[in-house]
Image (cartoon, helix red, strand yellow):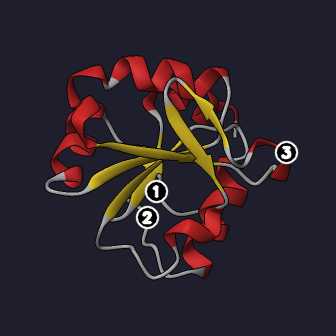
Amino acid sequence: MDQIFIDKKDIIQNIDKKKIIFFGAGNICNKTIKEFANYQNKFSCILDNAKLTHSTEQGGLAINDPNFIKNKNDEYYIIITSTSFNEISDQLKSIGFLPIKNYCVSPILKDLKTIQ
């Protein structure tokens, strides 16, 4: 498994001039949004694999189909906000996103890393 867990300070460095996308709607996403509230001006949207959530909103952010980010790995930094982080990591890698450089797992989920 690739290294996909990094500290908040490293996430902030990796974001640089990119917009932030959260991957995975729900409670973990809400907590992560609060954790990065100082960077709200960089928030773009939320991605989710559940079709029922598409075209809805959470916390004022649109929830989109993951196809939204195809061919856009230079524009966005993805923070995975789902317990299905291994599957989402594989999904992101399949469209050219690189672990750490283009995405990571929310620091909110760091306790799950030890369980894996």
**N-term-proximal mark, 3 vs 1:** 1
CA distance separating discs 2 and 3? 27 Å
Instruction: Using residue 44 as the reference point, say whether residue 55 is left or right of it.
Output: right
Q: Quadrant of the C terminus?
A: top right
Instruction: Using residue 8 as the reference point, say whether residue 115 is left or right of it.
Output: right
Q: Position of residue 63 (x, y in %)?
A: 61, 44
Count of picture labels: 3
CA distance separating discs 2 and 1? 7 Å
**N-term-proximal mark, 2 vs 1:** 1
Within 10 angstroms of label 3, few (less than 14), some, or many (20 or more) residues?
few
Going by the numbered disc 3, the residue's amino acid type is Leu
Disc 2 and disc 1 in contact, CB within 8 angstroms = yes
For image coordinates 40% across by 75% down, the residue present is 72
The residue tagged 2 is 99
The residue tagged 1 is 3
Q: Quadrant of the N terminus?
A: bottom right
For image coordinates 63% across by 30% down, the residue present is 112
Q: Position of residue 102 (x, y in %)?
A: 37, 64
Q: In the rendered image of this protein, does residue 33 appear above or below residue 102? A: above
Secondary structure found at label 3: helix
- Asked which quadrant contains residue 8, the reply is top left
Q: Position of residue 71 (x, y in %)?
A: 45, 82
For image coordinates 52% across by 63% down, the residue present is 2
- Outermost residue on the front side: it is 55
Please state which of residues 48 and 112 is positioned toward the viewer in this rendering. Answer: 48
Q: Position of residue 74 (x, y in %)?
A: 29, 73
The residue tagged 3 is 52
Instruction: Using residue 36 as the reference point, say whether residue 56 is left or right of it.
Output: right
Please state which of residues 36 and 90 is positioned toward the viewer in this rendering. Answer: 36
Nearer to us: label 2 or label 1? 2
Secondary structure found at label 2: loop
